[in-house]
């Protein structure tokens, strides 16, 4: 197997030498070039086509963020690790938005560096298999892959109702619209889908990926749990430490398989930016960003919107206002702050939602005639799916606007 080729980009020569020393005993990693500034890094990346670029964030001419953006576009099969003395979240967000796959804070050990290189290379290699036009993975089976739609609920702020809406949409699609639906809990450290649906999951996604590295339809189907509504559920790991077993490559394979076998794949995600969440966003047909009426959540949504735009996901992303009540920012204020029109507004109904959660029965099943349940149906209809069986035309419309379709 060929060694992992690495380009080092840092304006300080002694730092470049230190990095080479850290990697000296790593036989499967080979440094093939050095750059002293961002402009040189861009040129060398295009010339050498390295597997991984180690990019310092602060460099002359073009800084590490700017160089990362250009390399991500010009040499998309190369993975980039940003290295910096700054560990603030803002720098991490900028690096992720620019296209970096990992962020290392100096000083780091030889093990930290080597493991990061192996990690991003493994992830990028699997990613390349699925996106490369010449890949043997791409064949006539693509016809099947394009069958379904992947709808992902995402927000980096907790408590916005992400899991609640994901569960209710999945159940409504299956029960009322008679669609074949898979619901995947990819909040790997704190997933609550099974709690919301009152499911006792004996097997989870962590167990599945330990069965075999390369997933297939038969394996995946064996780990899906049937729900009363007809939807099938893939549970999150039962303990946080098991989350590390699930890699971006697993997620890419999983979603590819489910998309080929189901009409709709609903994905609940963790409130973080990492390689796993990027794999989900890469695969998604629609990304539903959830907000509510407080400023802190709005700040998270605005930042997420900027990052998704930088990652070229903006066309897939729509903002949903969840838990709308009489208090907090008004719709017009939220839209002005975000610079967009809200796709949907789901009304607050604390009593109904809490009762449904405590019983483990989604409110679209337990309270189908409430406004909050109606808002789920209106949201689904805005996806151009059609109307549920038994739909009554005189049903009072909820607050959801109908602004997007696949």
Image: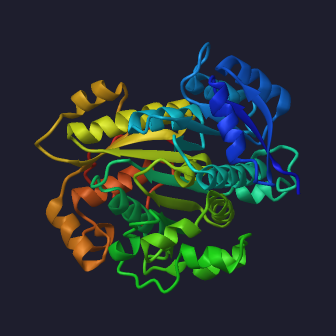
Q: Position of residue 166 (x, y in %)?
A: 40, 60
Q: Does 366 sit left or right of 70 as displayed?
A: left
Looking at the rendered structure, the number of numbered marks drawn on it comes to 0
Report the side of 382 relative to 394 (left or right): right
Q: For this rendering, which residue is in front, 164 or 192?
A: 192
Q: Is residue 180 above or below residue 299?
A: below
Q: What colour scheme has been applied to the protein in the rendered image?
A: rainbow
Q: Position of residue 223 (x, y in %)?
A: 58, 80
Along the viewing direction, whichever of 272 and 380 lies nearer the viewer? 272
Q: Residue furthest left?
A: 327
Q: Is residue 39 placed above or below 21 in the rendered structure? A: above
Rendered residue at 58%/37% (across/down): 82
Residue drawn at (48%, 69%), measured in percent from left and top? Answer: 174
Q: Is residue 323 left or right of residue 223?
A: left
Residue 212, by quadrant, is: bottom right
Residue occupying image coordinates x 25% and y 79%: 359
Residue 104, position as x, y percentages in the image? 54, 43
**Quarter containing the C terminus:** top right
Percent coordinates x, y for residue 243 in the rendering: 50, 68
Q: Measured along the vertical axis of the image, is residue 405 above or below residue 249?
A: above
Is residue 388 shown to the viewer in this render?
A: yes
159 left or right of 17 in image: left
Residue 54 falls in which quadrant of the image? top right
The answer to which of 238 and 244 lies nearer the viewer is: 244
Q: Quadrant of the N terminus?
A: bottom right
Q: Nearer the viewer, residue 118 or 317?
A: 118
Q: Is residue 178 visible?
A: no
Identify the residue at horizontal 23%, vertical 34% (top origin). Answer: 331
């Amino acid at each position: 197997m060929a060694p992992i080729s690495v380009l080092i980009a840092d304006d300080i020569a002694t730092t470049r030498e230190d990095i080479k020393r850290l990697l000296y005993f790593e036989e499967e990693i080979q440094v093939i070039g050095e750059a002293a500034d961002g402009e040189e890094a861009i040129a060398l990346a295009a010339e050498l086509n390295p597997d991984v670029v180690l990019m310092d964030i602060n460099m002359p001419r073009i800084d590490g963020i700017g160089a990362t953006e250009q390399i991500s576009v010009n040499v998309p099969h190369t993975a980039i690790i940003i290295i910096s003395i700054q560990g603030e979240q803002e720098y991490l967000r900028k690096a992720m938005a620019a296209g970096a796959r990992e962020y290392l804070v100096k000083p780091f050990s030889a093990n930290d560096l080597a493991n990061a290189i192996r990690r991003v290379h493994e992830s990028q290699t699997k990613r390349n298999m699925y996106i490369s036009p010449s890949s043997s993975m791409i064949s006539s089976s693509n016809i099947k892959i394009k069958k379904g739609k992947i709808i992902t609920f995402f927000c980096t702020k907790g408590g916005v109702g992400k899991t609640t809406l994901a569960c209710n949409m999945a159940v409504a699609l299956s029960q009322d619209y008679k669609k074949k639906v898979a619901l995947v809990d990819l909040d790997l450290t704190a997933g609550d889908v099974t709690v919301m649906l009152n499911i006792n999951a004996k097997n989870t996604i962590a167990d599945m990926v330990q069965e075999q590295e390369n997933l297939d339809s038969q394996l995946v189907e064996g780990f899906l749990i049937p729900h009363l509504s007809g939807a099938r559920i893939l549970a999150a790991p039962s303990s946080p430490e098991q989350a590390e077993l699930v890699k971006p490559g697993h997620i890419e394979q999983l979603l590819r398989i489910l998309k080929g076998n189901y009409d709709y794949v609903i994905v609940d995600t963790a409130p973080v930016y990492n390689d796993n969440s990027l794999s989900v966003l890469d695969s998604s047909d629609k990304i539903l960003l959830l907000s509510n009426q407080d400023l802190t959540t709005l700040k998270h949504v605005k930042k997420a919107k900027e990052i998704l735009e930088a990652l070229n996901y903006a066309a897939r992303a729509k903002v949903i206002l969840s838990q709308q009540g009489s208090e907090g920012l008004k719709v017009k204020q939220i839209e002005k702050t975000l610079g967009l029109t809200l796709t949907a507004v789901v009304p607050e109904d604390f009593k109904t939602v809490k009762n449904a959660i405590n019983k483990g029965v989604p409110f679209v099943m337990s309270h189908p005639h409430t406004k909050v349940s109606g808002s789920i149906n209106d949201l689904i209809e805005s996806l151009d799916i059609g109307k549920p069986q038994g739909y009554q035309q005189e049903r009072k419309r909820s607050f959801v606007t109908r602004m997007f379709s696949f």
